[in-house]
């Protein structure tokens, strides 16, 4: 109990409630009726008996009698309208009136007129300030007391924040900003300076309810978060000193029990990790290199992306890591792994896990992934919607297995940088996958002898000089007819000289570096085509495309 409380049967009007409440937020409003003081004569001071306090249903504060409104003079340059407060319920004997007042103040934004901000209503000021970047908010807080209070409320109400950390920023810059946002839920950092464990400590200390963290690094910055740090403890019973190693990032993940999403770039110094979290559902790590161990104990993990460096000396053992990943994360739905160390053994280890809910599988740059790997994938995962095997060594036979296994589920197929795939395999995929919406076949139909690529002026000469044994490899035609395909990428297909497309819903076509595609062998029946990428192509090819598609076409040359 705090203070005197009325009987539950006694109704309270808004006017009486405001008189009891008093003025707690400043001296700009009347303490009796709550209206701005400037040019205002309070009608509660009238003694003529014209005004009677209502005793039935609580009235809205800005509903004033006609006579009282006639006694007030409002400046014609500013129209002051008191916002409608939520209807007050009767105070019960067991309620805390002060607590109810504090909760209503948290829900409502103070919409009073701020005289120090040039008579701009605070609700307008709020809408302006909430669109400012953090640097703009800090500058606005130095203008006046009213602006400082508004910016403070915006900081405290912020749930999502994006900060660019400049290269010359001090280590306490991020901490000073995060301390203003106690309710922060999502944080995105674009770091131009070096990243170390101090930044992780600032985030862990300031953001107790953080759910999503994303750290992006620039080309000049270095992520110095190391894989291990050593700590020492003394066993008093045996008088020995014990040393142990613990991963910094793993400790951060284990202690942030609300964290559901972590995305971090530049993890070249990580060395290894042991992740243990019951809340983490999304994990993206890039620029990984030579990890000594990868241990996942995340039963609710649904999406993982591990992007390794392209260096040949990467010593990461992906086979054992894939085996542990599949067994300890049974709810995985999306898997993306890019590494030159991907092999058939790693695919077999992943396929051995019981991941029946897997929807997206992306194994990129694994030159040792073959048709046998495709057979393991099709036998273990039957509900894939996206399959990315770019950079693998699969052939048209592997495409046939993919089409036989996923005819009703697969909507995105990416097979870029697969030199063993021909135009026949691509045509078969588009014919057997009716739900296909995106297909990437970049650098598949490539010219094995690029110096023999002909120009526009010597087409016939180039054809005559090319040996007959290479005609089926260099010059291929592609015919695609599909009713749902929306994006098709044929970038780098320099071995393609004829293209026929009948795709009514196709809106994006990539023909970059299709140097040997002949304009007279191009036919596009795509009425909804909006964007065509045609860099490093023949000049006549662009004119042919313009003449065959709608006027809304947008070229990217």
Image (spheres, grey):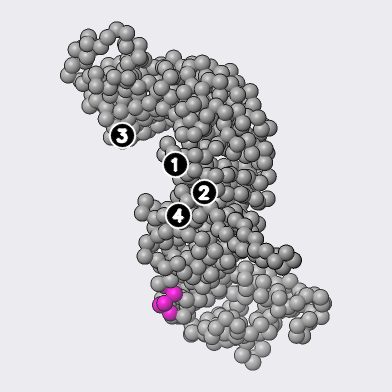
Q: Is residue 370 magenta?
A: no
Q: What label sits on residue 223 in the rendered view?
A: 4
Left of 278 or right of it: where is 384? left
Q: Nearer the viewer, residue 543 or 465?
A: 465
Residue 178 spot, x, y in % from top left: 52, 66
Left of 493 or right of it: where is 105? right
Which secondary structure, mark 4?
Answer: loop
Quadrant of the drawing holding the C terminus: top left
Q: Nearer the viewer, residue 107 or 465?
A: 465
> Label 3: few (<14), some or many (≥20) within 10 Å?
some
First-in-chain label (2 vs 1): 2
Residue 97 spot, x, y in % from top left: 73, 78
Residue located beneath label 1 in the image: 309
Choose mark 4 or mark 2, whichever is in front: 2
Which secondary structure, mark 1?
Answer: loop
Q: Answer yes or no: is residue 36 visible.
A: yes
Q: What label sits on residue 271 in the rendered view?
A: 2
Q: CA distance from mark 3 to mark 2?
A: 45 Å
Q: CA distance from mark 1 to mark 4?
A: 14 Å
Q: Spot the residue most to the top.
A: 468
Q: Spot the residue most to the left.
A: 457
Residue located beneath label 3 in the image: 555
Q: Is residue 208 above or below residue 49?
A: above
Choose mark 3 or mark 4, whichever is in front: 4
Question: At x 55% / y 44%, what residue is drawn?
Answer: 292
First-in-chain label (3 vs 4): 4
């Amino acid at each position: 109990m705090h203070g005197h409380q009325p009987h539950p049967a006694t109704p309270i009007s808004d006017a009486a409630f405001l008189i009891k409440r008093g003025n707690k937020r400043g001296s700009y409003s009347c303490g009796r009726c709550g209206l701005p003081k400037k040019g205002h004569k309070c009608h509660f001071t009238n003694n003529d008996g014209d005004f009677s306090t209502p005793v039935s249903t609580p009235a809205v504060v800005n509903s004033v009698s006609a006579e009282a409104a006639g006694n007030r003079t409002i400046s014609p340059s500013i129209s002051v309208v008191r916002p409608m407060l939520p209807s007050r319920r009767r105070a019960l004997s067991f309620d805390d009136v002060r607590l109810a007042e504090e909760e209503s103040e948290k829900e409502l934004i103070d919409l009073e007129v701020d005289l120090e901000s040039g008579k701009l209503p605070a609700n307008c000021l709020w809408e302006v300030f909430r669109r400012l970047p953090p640097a703009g908010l800090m500058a606005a807080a130095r203008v006046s007391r009213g602006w400082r209070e508004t910016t403070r409320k915006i900081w405290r109400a912020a749930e999502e924040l994006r900060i660019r950390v400049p290269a010359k920023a001090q280590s306490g810059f991020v901490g000073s900003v995060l301390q203003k946002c106690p309710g922060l839920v999502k944080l995105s950092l674009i770091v131009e300076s070096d990243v170390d464990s101090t930044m992780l400590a600032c985030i862990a200390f300031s953001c107790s309810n953080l759910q999503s963290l994303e750290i992006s690094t620039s080309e000049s910055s270095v992520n110095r978060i190391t894989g291990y740090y050593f700590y020492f403890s003394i066993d008093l019973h045996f008088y020995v000193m014990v040393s142990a190693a613990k991963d910094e990032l793993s400790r951060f993940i284990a202690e942030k029990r609300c964290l559901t999403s972590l995305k971090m770039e530049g993890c070249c110094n990580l060395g290894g990790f042991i992740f243990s979290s019951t809340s983490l559902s999304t994990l993206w790590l890039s620029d990984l290199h030579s990890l000594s161990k990868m241990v996942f104990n995340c039963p609710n993990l649904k999406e993982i992306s591990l992007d390794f460096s392209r260096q040949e000396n990467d010593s990461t053992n992906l086979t054992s890591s894939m085996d542990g990943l599949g067994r300890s994360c049974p709810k995985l739905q999306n898997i993306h792994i890019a590494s030159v160390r991907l092999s058939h053994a790693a695919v077999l280890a992943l396929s051995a896990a019981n991941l029946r809910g897997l929807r997206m599988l992306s194994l990129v740059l694994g030159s040792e992934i073959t048709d046998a790997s495709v057979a393991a994938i099709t036998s273990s995962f039957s509900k894939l919607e996206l399959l990315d095997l770019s950079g693998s060594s699969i052939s048209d036979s592997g495409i046939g297995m993919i089409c036989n296994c996923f005819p009703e589920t697969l909507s995105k197929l990416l097979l870029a940088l697969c030199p063993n795939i021909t135009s026949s395999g691509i045509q078969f995929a588009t014919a057997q996958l009716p739900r296909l919406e995106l297909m990437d076949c970049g650098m598949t139909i490539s010219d094995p002898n690029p110096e023999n690529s002909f120009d526009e002026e010597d087409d016939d000469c180039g054809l005559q000089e090319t040996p007959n044994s290479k005609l089926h490899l260099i010059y291929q035609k592609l015919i695609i007819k599909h009713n749902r395909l929306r994006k098709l990428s044929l970038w780098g297909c320099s071995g393609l000289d004829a293209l026929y497309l009948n795709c009514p819903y196709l809106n994006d076509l990539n023909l970059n570096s299709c140097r040997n595609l002949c304009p007279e062998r191009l036919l596009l029946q795509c009425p909804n085509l909006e964007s065509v990428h045609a860099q490093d192509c023949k000049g006549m090819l662009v004119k042919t495309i313009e003449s065959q598609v709608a006027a809304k076409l947008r070229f990217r040359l």
